[in-house]
Amino acid sequence: MYRFLLSRQWVILTLLALLLIPTMIRLGFWQMHRYEERTARNDLVARALDADPVPVERLTAPGRRIGGEQRYRTVTAEGRFDTDREVVVRRRTNADDAIGYHVLTPFVLTDGRVLLVNRGWIPADGPSQTAFPRIPAPPRGAITVTGRLMPDETTAASGIKDLEGLPDRQIMLISSEREAARLDAEVLGGYVVLAEPKPAAGGPQLIGRPGDEDSALNFAYAVQWWLFAAAVPVGWWFLVRREVRDRTAAPDTAPGPAEPDPEPATL
């Protein structure tokens, strides 16, 4: 009754089902890992943003790498902006997905060391983006800034290529090590996304606080893939039973013995 399973069509169908089951199970585990990663990131961001501000010198120093526990922490710093040596970070978008720059300004601390401060987003002056844009100035003199501490940017983490041959005072990625060489100064590791003081009218747009990633969606996708994996053998068995039923119910069409021709009538 089940010899049809050895046919070419059913062998291919069975092998496809056997391939789909582990593939869907692995996709489910991948989505579950994404759920756990996003949940951990959301918890980290929430703890960091809820923590009390601390002086930036407590969390970073020249050459220090910013780790997960320091990322997004609110820090304060006292000093002054050095706008003569600020640069812009290319190909950055705002909340409306408009392309422009991030303004990266050295902030000279009271002890002479430098903290990189991302003052926010400004629009590009033209399509070429070769000329250095006009940047509204920050407050002058000694001030206190507050912002979120961030690690140096890398291509692996951001997906942004670090291009060479850029126009003067334009960069693709924020690197405290590279800026330390350019400025010939002791630069604290990482950089700060400015939150206070607020820019004056027409100044750079502050970068918004990081939001929660939708981890629940990954959890739903994981369950969905596992349900699909469970449905494959059920669907395969349903098709087999239907094939058996159809073959059993098919009428016997084999030809029987030939009937003799009728004898001709006699008068």
Image: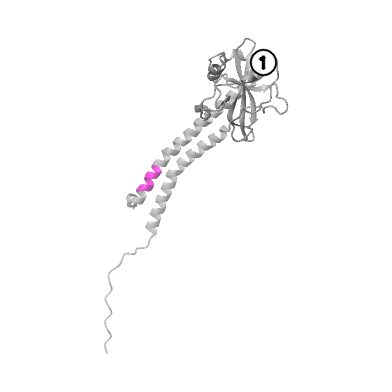
Can you give x and y, in whole percent of width and height, for residue 224 in the image? 51, 39
Where residue 90 appears, x then y in whole percent?
58, 29
Quarter location, residue 84: top right
Res 94 → quadrant: top right
Residue 233 sits above or below residue 59 on the image: below
Residue in front for this viewpoint, 51 or 198: 198
Look at the image and say whether residue 14 sits in the magenta stretch.
yes
Q: Is residue 66 left or right of residue 255?
A: right
Eyeballing the image, is 126 above or below 60?
below
Residue 180 visible in the shown view: yes
Q: Which residue is mark 1?
A: 80
| Placement of the C terminus among the 4 image quadrants | bottom left
Placement of 157 over or under 1, stated as above or below: above
In the image shown, does 96 or 165 lie closer to the viewer?
165
Q: Residue furthest top?
A: 111
Tell me residue 239's x, y (percent).
Answer: 42, 50
The residue closer to the viewer here, 132 or 42, is: 132
Q: Is residue 22 left or right of residue 211?
A: left
Q: Secondary structure at mark 1?
A: strand
Which residue is located at x 53 percent, y 31 percent?
Answer: 35
From the image, give the main secondary structure of the stretch colored magenta: helix
Identity of the amino acid at label 1?
Arg
Please indicate, yes or no, whether residue 208 appears anywhere in the rendered image.
Answer: no
- Tell me where the magenta segment starts and ends, as one range: 11-18
How many other residues sit within 10 Å of disc 1, few (<14), some (14-19) or many (≥20)?
many
